[in-house]
Image (cartoon, grey):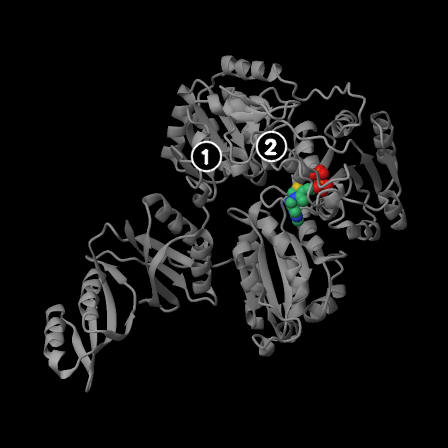
Amino acid sequence: MKHTLVALLRDQPGVLNRAVSLFRRRGFNIESLTVGHSEQPGISRMTLVVDGDNTSVEQVIKQLYKLIDVLKVSDVTADANVSRELVLAKVFAPPARRSDLMQIADIFGARVVDVTPDSLMVELTSEPDAADRFIDLLKSFGIREMVRTGCVAMVRGSSTVSAPKSVDRAA
Amino acid sequence: MSKTLNGAQIMCEALIAEGVDVMFGYPGGAIMPFYHALPEYPQLRHVLVRHEQAAGHAAEGYARTSGKVGVCVATSGPGATNLVTALADAMMDSVPIVAITGQVASSMIGKDAFQETDVTGITQPITKHNYLVTDINDLPRVFKEAFHIARTGRPGPVLIDVAKDVQQARAEFAYPAEVDLPGYRPTYDGNSRQIREAAALIATAERPLLMAGRGVLIANAHFELRELVEKTGIPVITTLLGISAIPEDHPLALGMPGMHGWVHVNRAIQQCDLLISVGARFDDRVTGKLDTFARHAKIIHIDIDPAEISKNVYADVPIVGDARSVLSALIAAVEPRDCAAWLQQVREMQATRSQKQYKNDSGLFRPHDVYAELTRIVRGAARFVTDVGQHQMWAAQLIDYLQPHSHITSGGLGTMGFALPAGVGVQIACPDEEVWVIAGDGGWQMNIQELATVVQEGLPLKMAIINNGFLGMVRQWQELFHERRYSATPMWSPDFIKVADAYGIPGLRIDSAAGVAAAIHTARGTRGPFLLEFVVEREVNVYPMVAPGASISEMFEEPAATEPVAIK
Ligand SMILES: Cc1ncc(C[n+]2csc(CCOP(=O)(O)OP(=O)(O)O)c2C)c(N)n1
């Protein structure tokens, strides 16, 4: 089963390398991984999609926690969450097929962001599953070039995934 | 009251602030500023080894015995890569060491400069954490964090790679009083609900068994361990790295489980209805075939590293915490009971076997004769540092360890060449104690150069080579599982006594059981280092044995090496 994990990391040299090499070494099957800034300065946020049973996902989480610069890891799979992925695709679109393509894009809520005489570039932001279906449809036109960002996720509601604060010196 | 110092001086000040009094190292270009500063700090003893690997193992030996952080130092490039094996060894066995390496100047990093290697990259999976320091202002914090990380939680090696220009730059020095690592907060106290659950299981189990691993020794929890088992009567087994967590002459101490464990111990595992693991990680050399291991038992797994719990064996009651703290809580939570019937059952299984009986009527000189005499003569009053191979397993099986931390070996990594340099560190940690290094003729030659360190430092190490003319443990596997095809295992060796003599170390070669006792007395009676070379029967095997990948229910026993003994 696919699990979506959110991890917060301190922006230290090599931290991404540590995480990635951990997955390689332990043979964890990572489907997608994205990293970017979070709301807190100095803290990056990573979203991981892992395919595995509960025990192996639990090991991923525990092993990630062993990295000194990993502050927080949450499995948000079971939570109501918003998962999004961005797709850019350059698709063959001779004039005769162009309107078909634009119709499909419209249905998925994708935007046309560049046009040439024989191709269109479309941009889609959607749930990863919808992105899969969209890309399947694009294949019949011929995809010249494509990039997906990988999934990012955030739990709905007022709770947040946030990092533990620095040591409370009084404690 | 900060003062302006150069980076090298800051490194020395930091070491002193961390309570370091000795380090093991080897100089070279990129670490020369540090070595230049060192003589200004006479309270920092530096032991010059003859190979950086030995610096790492010596730091391990020091740390494994004293519980303090061991420190090793090397230059960039080849110096640092030579440390790799020792770091991996320390990682596997949770040994707190800090390795300091020089790195090329920060302006040269990434340019394939002379003796540049990506040491933080290379050592990342084999260190608990590592640092590359390219700004002198980071030095004090990095040292503070490195020592904190190495010694707390599940201990492990930390490497600090310091660019040469950082060692030469100047800065105000102030050592931080505390670390700020929000992502690193080990759990020391066990969850009280889990402890109550564990106590309830202990109260009702009919055949409980406690397995002590190195975590008990790291946490200095041997008193608590004893108190708990004496209060409950639960028999104790000790993994290879848990040996000496309980005195082996204790009525509840059963011995070692696993591939070369005792039959009665493996049987006890297979028959128990509750297995309490304390600071052990269910290594495959202990469990054998996993799905046949302790099938009738509920498992209580106590470990400070949450990632160990349910990694190999599912834990019915997981308790994350420090062995000492959790055992204390358990002592308070359990009611006194006894396990007399169960203990007797196990002891009966033991009595039907030829366990520690070394009686030798073959007339041949077997390694067992050496261990029998060592045990009889030394009587637990020494520390034993072993290498890797057959001699290591015999040492684990046959010597009686009576004091905590008296058995030091490379367990998880199984590093040949460990014993002699580790022995250097052990002897330096315990200058007034008797320390024995035991190695095979193979492993002995992997770091034989450290005899020079022994002499230069004036260490009174007692050293024993069990010379069987083979890479014995590999030969044993070839005999049992590879059609006795002795590929690359027969080994020529130099005259070890003459080699020792060239270093100025006296020695004796013993080639019959009759000469063993006198030789041991001579070695012990000689001031300073002494080497004993025991030239034993060439093809003796370690028994009992579980074949690799087999269930611990199927053990081979001597002498019918082809008939597994089924354990019910
Ligand atoms: C560095 C290293 N290389 C290879 C091995 C594989 N190995 C394990 S035991 C062994 C034989 C050891 O022979 P020796 O040192 O003579 O000891 P004995 O088994 O005869 O007691 C070997 C080669 C190892 N553990 N470590």
> What percent of the width, then of the height, locates residue A121?
22, 79
Q: Does residue B185 appear left or right of residue B218 in this picture?
A: left
The relative height of residue B98 versus residue B354 in the rendered view (above or below) is below
Rendered image quadrant of residue B353: top right
Do marks 1 and 2 share a subunit? yes
Q: Position of residue A48 (x, y in %)?
A: 33, 58
Separation of marks 1 and 2 at Cα, in angstroms? 25 Å
Asked whether mark 2 lies closer than 8 Å to ligand 1, one says no
Residue B182 to residue B162: above or below: above
Residue A138 vertical position relative to residue B48 in the rendered view, above or below: below
> What residue is shown at x 49% (from left), y 21% (from top)?
B232
Find ligand 1 in the image and state its quadrant.
top right
Label 2 Cα crowd, 10 Å radius (few <14 / some 14-19 / many 20+): many
Write down the residue under mark 2. B245
Mark seen at residue B236: none
For numbered disc 1, what is the local secondary structure? Answer: helix
Q: Nearer the viewer, residue B210 or B390?
A: B390
Q: Mark 1 — on which chain does it sit?
A: B
> Does the image show residue B312?
yes
- Nearer-N-terminus badge (1/2): 2
**Tag 2 secondary structure:** loop
Q: Chain of mark 2?
A: B
Residue B21 visible somewhere in the drawing: no
Residue B424 in the image: above or below residue B141: above
Q: Which mark is residue B290?
A: 1
Image coords of residue B222 (percent x, y): 58, 32
Q: Amino acid at mark 2?
A: Ala
Picture residue at 13% right of the left edge, 71% below the top: A109
The image quarter containing residue B119 is bottom right
